[in-house]
Each structure stands twice: as structure tokens, then as C-alpha cells.
């Protein structure tokens, strides 16, 4: 099957009403064959398609890691390269995909979890682009819901985002903080409790609208 035809079929599956079944069908393709079309779909103009490509990438690479761990590592390094200034690109969807993959695969999380931490660390591999920062925060939240221990020692890195002037970063940082149970974040979260700005959050394979205040209050209730 040509790359173009495979990408067309992958796109149709990502648009499917029954996305759980669509994921099963995507995972039935040889992993190294379907990965390249999914990379391309991380840049699709439809937001839900982009996000579902993240979900599919997570499932495909996690399953690949169970059989061919080195092949999965190569894909992880490809995402890392996409976020490197030397790549010449922007890396849209890369931090989100890293978080999704590691949320699904414990071994890759053990090996690469610290990398996702470093993308939010000014002393690490800090990403300055605001849209990439949103991706990093979503990746934090997704992985932290499965493996909070990776982020708990570095939870204070969320404070600048909670105090940001960008309400997208505020809301995503509040959402990412929920599984961490850190008292040190409470003051910053309380400052956001009445914020009415809305962000679109990808959860449970759907895009959902939430206010910054709703996300902050939900996290405060869990701390």
C-alpha cells in the first residue's frame, strides 16, 4: 500500500465515530508502516484529527515497544529531534505524543520520562514556544495521571505556568498538577479559582471546553 493511500485510510479512521474500534484497526497495521502517516497527521488542520493522531501514536508505539524496543526508541528519538532547534522544524504534536506513548508504556516512561520534565525546566531543555509549552503541559498531565512519581519532585516547575499571562498555560498547568498532590502549588491554584477564560482540553478521545477556574478548583479538591 502506498504512503498516500495509507495516510488517507488513517485519516478516515481518526475521524471515525467509533474511535475505539478505529484504534484497533490502526494497530492492526505493521507499526513501522503506520507511524509515518501518523506523524503527518499530527499537523492536520482539524484539531480532533491531530489529537486522535496523538492517541493512535501512543497505542502504536507502545505496542511496538513490547516486541521491538529499539524500534520504539528510534521513534522516541525522532520526536526529540523534532523538538531540537537543529531540526529546522517546530515539532507540533511531539511533546503530546511523548506523553501519550509513555502513559501507555512503562518501560519507555522509565527511560524517557525525565525528558518530558526537562522541557519545562529553564535549566534543562526548556521549550520557549508557547504552543509547544502547551503540548509539554498536556504531556505532563497525561503521563502524571499514570505515573505521578516522575513529576512529583519537579512539581514546582509548574508554578511559572500557573502564574503565566497566557490563560491556556494557566489552565493546562492546573490540569497537569491534579495528580501530583503538591501543597506547594496551592497558592498559585487559588489565584486561578475564579478565572473564567475557556480552554479546549483533550480527554477521553474528545475535545472538551473547560474554564481555567474549573480546572484549578478540581485540582485544589484533589490536593
Image (cartoon, rainbow, N blue to C red):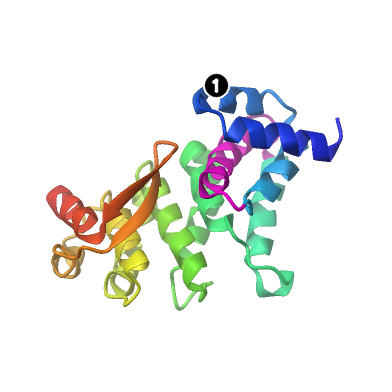
Q: Which of 9 and 95 is in front in this view?
A: 9
Name the residue: 73% across, 36% down.
8
Q: Is residue 66 magenta?
A: yes
Classify 146 as above or below 140: above
User: Percent from the top left, x then y, of residue 132?
Assistant: 51, 66
What element does badge 1 sit on?
A: helix
- Start-end of magenta stretch: 45-70
Residue 87 falls left or right of residue 191: right
Classify 110 as above or below 30: below
Name the residue: 34% across, 44% down.
145
Classify 129 as above or below 30: below
State the residue position of label 1.
Answer: 21
User: Percent from the top left, x then y, of residue 31?
Assistant: 71, 33
Q: Which of 189 and 153 is in front in this view?
A: 189
Residue 63 falls left or right of residue 180: right
| Residue 119 in sight in this render | no
Quarter holding residue 78: bottom right
The N terminus sits in image quarter: top right
**What predominant SS class does the magenta segment belong to?**
helix
Q: Does the magenta stretch include residue 176?
A: no
Classify 160 as above or below 52: below
User: Percent from the top left, x then y, of residue 122?
Assistant: 45, 78
| Residue 7 in sight in this render | yes
Q: How many marks?
A: 1
User: Percent from the top left, x then y, of residue 144?
Assistant: 37, 49
Label 1 environment density (alpha carbons within 10 Å; few <14, some 14–19, many ≥20): few
Name the residue: 53% across, 57% down.
95
Question: Residue farthest to the right?
Answer: 2
Name the residue: 49% across, 67% down.
131
Amino acid at each position: 500500500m502506498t504512503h498516500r493511500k495509507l495516510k488517507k485510510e488513517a485519516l478516515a479512521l481518526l475521524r471515525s465515530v467509533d474511535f475505539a474500534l478505529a484504534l484497533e484497526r490502526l494497530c492492526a497495521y505493521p507499526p513501522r508502516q503506520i507511524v509515518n502517516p501518523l506523524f503527518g497527521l499530527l499537523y492536520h488542520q482539524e484539531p480532533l484529527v491531530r489529537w486522535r493522531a496523538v492517541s493512535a501514536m501512543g497505542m502504536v508505539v507502545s505496542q511496538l515497544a513490547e516486541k521491538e524496543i529499539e524500534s520504539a526508541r528510534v521513534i522516541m528519538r525522532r520526536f526529540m529531534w523534532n523538538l531540537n532547534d537543529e531540526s529546522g522544524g517546530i515539532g507540533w504534536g511531539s511533546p503530546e505524543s511523548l506523553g501519550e506513548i509513555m502513559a501507555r508504556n512503562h518501560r519507555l516512561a522509565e527511560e524517557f520520562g525525565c525528558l518530558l520534565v526537562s522541557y519545562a525546566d529553564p535549566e534543562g531543555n526548556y521549550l520557549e514556544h508557547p504552543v509547544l509549552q502547551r503540548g509539554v503541559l498536556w504531556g505532563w498531565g497525561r503521563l502524571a495521571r499514570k505515573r505521578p512519581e516522575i513529576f512529583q519532585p519537579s512539581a514546582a516547575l509548574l508554578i511559572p505556568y500557573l502564574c503565566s499571562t497566557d490563560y491556556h498555560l494557566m489552565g493546562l498547568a492546573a490540569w497537569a498538577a491534579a495528580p501530583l498532590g503538591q501543597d506547594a502549588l496551592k497558592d498559585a491554584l487559588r489565584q486561578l479559582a475564579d478565572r473564567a477564560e475557556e480552554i479546549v482540553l483533550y480527554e477521553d478521545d474528545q475535545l472538551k471546553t473547560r474554564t481555567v477556574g474549573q480546572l484549578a478548583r478540581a485540582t485544589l479538591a484533589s490536593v
